[in-house]
Amino acid sequence: MPILLPLVGDEPPERADAARNREALLAAADELIAECGVASLTMDALATRAGVGKGTVFRRFDSREGLMAALLNRSETQFQAAILSGPPPLGPGAAPMERLLAFGHTRIVLNRIHGALIMAAGRAGERSYASVSFTAMHMRYLLGELGVRGDIPFLATALLAPLEAPILEQQVEIDEMDLARFVEAWDDLVRRVVGG
């Protein structure tokens, strides 16, 4: 079997032990965020929680912004995997309307966390084109499955817009809209688009 060399600019493949160490650090970071919030996650706190030196954390992620971007990337990857092959109703096997509502509810919860991560990650936290495309494609797919008529790409964008972190933050934090009310309002929007 020929040995393939990486393309220029490609990242070299990660060793299995390095991947395990990276996952352990990210899991420790998730624990700290759950306990104290994103603002309290420091490289020192992560090193202490993971039982490694601070230098190890910096070598792995370069900076706090790099750590936040890695957490975002991991969360997006897990979210996409749950949609493609996870259990229903988010994953395959549920009715399209159940999947659509589960998608929105999960996205709302994730983006409450992601909003803080994106702010902490700076430019490194900008969502990739591939991530945005995946989300839009899935929404279009579900609307098609539901037999929605009209401009599906535009309707998908209209349903996704309220779920984005800046808009969600505006509604919940600045306008002091209860999160349960936000979820109900999004569900109502979905039913109007699907029923209309």
Image: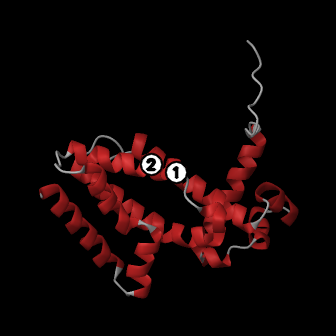
| Disc marking residue 164 | none
In the image, 177 versus 53, the foreground residue is: 177
Residue shown at the point (34%, 82%) measured from the top left: 178
Q: Position of residue 82 (x, y in %)?
A: 44, 47
Neighbour class for label 1 at 10 Å: few (<14), some, many (≥20)?
few
Residue shown at the point (58%, 68%) measured from the top left: 118
Image check: 147 left or right of 94? left
**Residue holding disc 1:** 129
In the image, 118 versus 32, the foreground residue is: 118
Q: Quadrant of the N terminus?
A: top right
Classify 132 as above or below 51: above
Classify 37 as above or below 87: below
Q: Quadrant of the C terminus?
A: bottom left
Q: Quarter of the image holding residue 49?
A: bottom right
- Can the viewer see residue 185 in this picture? yes
| Disc marking residue 133 | 2
